[in-house]
Image (tube, rainbow, N blue to C red):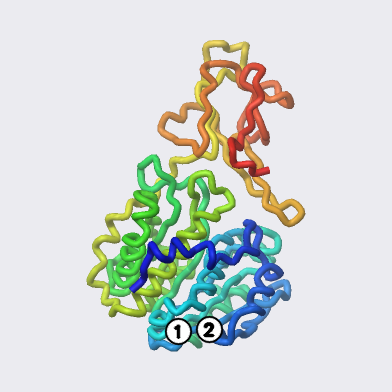
Amino acid sequence: MLDAPYFISQYNSLKATTLGNRYITNAHIEPLLNSLSKQFSQTILGVSEAGLPIHGLQIGRGSKRILIWSQMHGNESTTTKALFDLFSYFELPDSKTLLEGCTLFIIPILNPDGAEAYTRLNGNQIDLNRDAKALTQSESKILRTAYEDFKPHFCFNMHGQRTIFSAGNTHNSAVLSFLSPSENEERSLTVTRQKSMEIIQVMNQALQPYLPNQIGRYDDGFNDSCVGDYFQSHGTPTILFEAGHFPEDYKREETRKYMALALISALDYVATNPVSGDAYKPYFDIPENGKLFYDVIVRNALLNPLTPKVFSDIGIQFTEVLVSGVVRFQPKVAFIGDLNDKLGHLELDANFKQVSHPDFEVLSEDYEIDFITIELTKISLFGNNNLI
């Protein structure tokens, strides 16, 4: 049985430290793939639309087969980092029971073109998570072939989510979120969905001591063009994993650690328990994600000295930009108005003083700014995060 406290205490020794940026491509993972032990079998499943190889690897000898894929969206790399941390765990004696109970087939980067460009879409500007039925893209066909050949009992669909999400209507960001996708428009509570829910509630139990009230549940609206919904509707219990924002962790290194714990707890449970779906009900205790957060909120700001009695809040979101192989964060004014019902990962109170930027006469929505001035005081929008 997984010893979560021991895993957390040992995590730094397991971490694939060469994967430390948000920008993760084939060039970053291939040296690590080349150094994996012989207990992994590896193959090239095919090539992307731009001709980049798509790697697959298999490990384990158990009867329960689990298919895992990451970076279907090229700029969602946290789960890929967690997978390579997991590979280090597989070298420990602690993983013996897991690998005797399960066989894993893993695609660490399904969308290498999107990873290279640091975009959600693939090289043809197609969202692969809307191509499950049409199969218009080579990457989608490769995943479907892996699914049909491997015949998994479970699928783990690995993604990343924006900083806007809260764990329900709480003041906590959703550090990790999960979903048991629907199989139909009616969102029927089928046995297949219940099996996914059972595994999710086990992960939630393992994570709550470390992320209390910071786990969210995605909306389960049905779209059979999405891969998770498609596989679930074809009888394979599928789980959506979403890596979110841990406070002051824009590099998502803390999130990565807890994603690795989530993965190991799920795999350990599947390996050592019959997953019937009977223990699904605690899944619904996980709050559905809200959208309460901005990256920065400046409150009580005077924007225009010509209207000295009009005060506003300023909501700022970071846009991720790839610059010379490093992901930078560009603040943009997303909303000006009343944000009393919203939260900021960083909050500044202007105390009814004038807020401005030297490049603009009056701040407005969609302006890109790295700092503000409150009267004559220059204030960085990054707090202590040192993001740029």
Relative to 362, is 173 on the left or the right? left
Query: Which of the 4 image quadrants contains residue 237?
Result: bottom left
Q: Which residue is mark 2?
A: 58
Callout 2, which amino acid? Gln
Relative to 120, is 173 on the left or the right? left
Callout 1, which amino acid? Thr
Query: Which of the 4 image quadrants contains residue 47?
Result: bottom right
Q: Residue at 53% of width from left, 16% of height from top? A: 352
Mark 2–mark 1 distance (CA, rounded to whole Å): 7 Å
Q: Compared with residue 27, is residue 216 higher up or lower down, i.e. above or below?
A: above
Q: Residue at 61% of width from left, 20% of height from top? A: 374
Q: Residue at 65% of width from left, 71% of height from top? A: 29
Q: Compared with residue 388, is residue 153 higher up or lower down, i.e. above or below?
A: below
Image coords of residue 144 (percent x, y) = 53, 79
Q: Compared with residue 267, is residue 350 higher up or lower down, i.e. above or below?
A: above
Which quarter of the rendered picture does the C terminus lie within?
A: top right
Q: Residues within 10 Å of mark 2 (few under 14, many from 20)?
A: some
Relative to 41, is 11 on the left or the right? left
Res. 129 in view: no
Image coords of residue 127 (percent x, y) = 58, 63
**Please, which residue is most extreme toward the right here?**
324
Numbered mark located on residue 264 in the image: none
Q: Residue at 35% of width from left, 49% of height from top? A: 213
Q: Which residue is mark 1?
A: 103
